[in-house]
Image (tube, grey):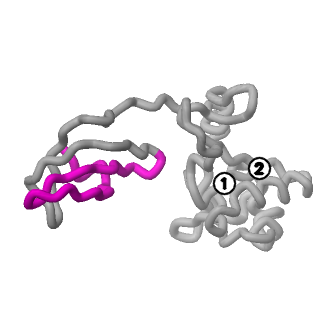
Amino acid sequence: MLVPLGSSERVWAVIRAKPQKELFILGYLEREDVSAYCPVVLRKGSRSKPRPCFPGYLFVEISPRFELFSISRAPNVLCPLMFGGELAAVEPDVIERFREMESATGVIELENPQRFRKGDVVKIGSGSFAGLKAVVTEWLPEKERVRLLLDYFGREVALEADEALLA
């Protein structure tokens, strides 16, 4: 939803953050007694650390008329998300639905569908090796990439490809 900048009604505004600074801003705003939220996700079984669900964005509960300027000046905040001179905001029930999905640790755990398995034979859809078949050696779901072993003119070639290019 879009909210006029002169509105004194409290809304969950969308704020753009510097890359990988969402959680820093969240902590800073909470120390300033500003309600802020940044949903974080983690794939079940993953050994990586949780990451923001919306990289580069977080939500703050503010009154645009009275608090937007100070929020815009917070460290590592780039700007509020705006369209046509109005502030982008989400309905409070959207924030509640995200919070309901969180585990006890405050992380939203995502199912990890096993799209590619070690030993699967796939066909490369585009690029220099388009049309050739390769064997999956490792699937990297966090990067949306697949490591492959390709038999190319009698030589085994290891490569990494975007999973969207494979069939």
Residue highlighted by disc 2: 36
Q: What residue span does the magenta drawing correspond to?
A: 142-167
Residue 20 falls within the magenta-colored stretch: no
Residue 166 falls within the magenta-colored stretch: yes
Q: Which image quarter: residue 135? A: top left
How many marks the image carries: the answer is 2
Instruction: Give the amino acid at mark 1.
Output: Leu
* Residue 167 % position (x, y): 18, 43
Nearest the viewer among 94 and 137 is: 137
* Residue 89 % position (x, y): 62, 52
Residue highlighted by disc 1: 58
Labelled pair 2, 1 in contact (Cβ < 8 Å): yes
Q: Secondary structure at mark 2?
A: strand
* Residue 76 % position (x, y): 73, 70
Label 2 environment density (alpha carbons within 10 Å; few <14, some 14–19, many ≥20): many
Residue at 60 percent of width and 44 percent of height: 48
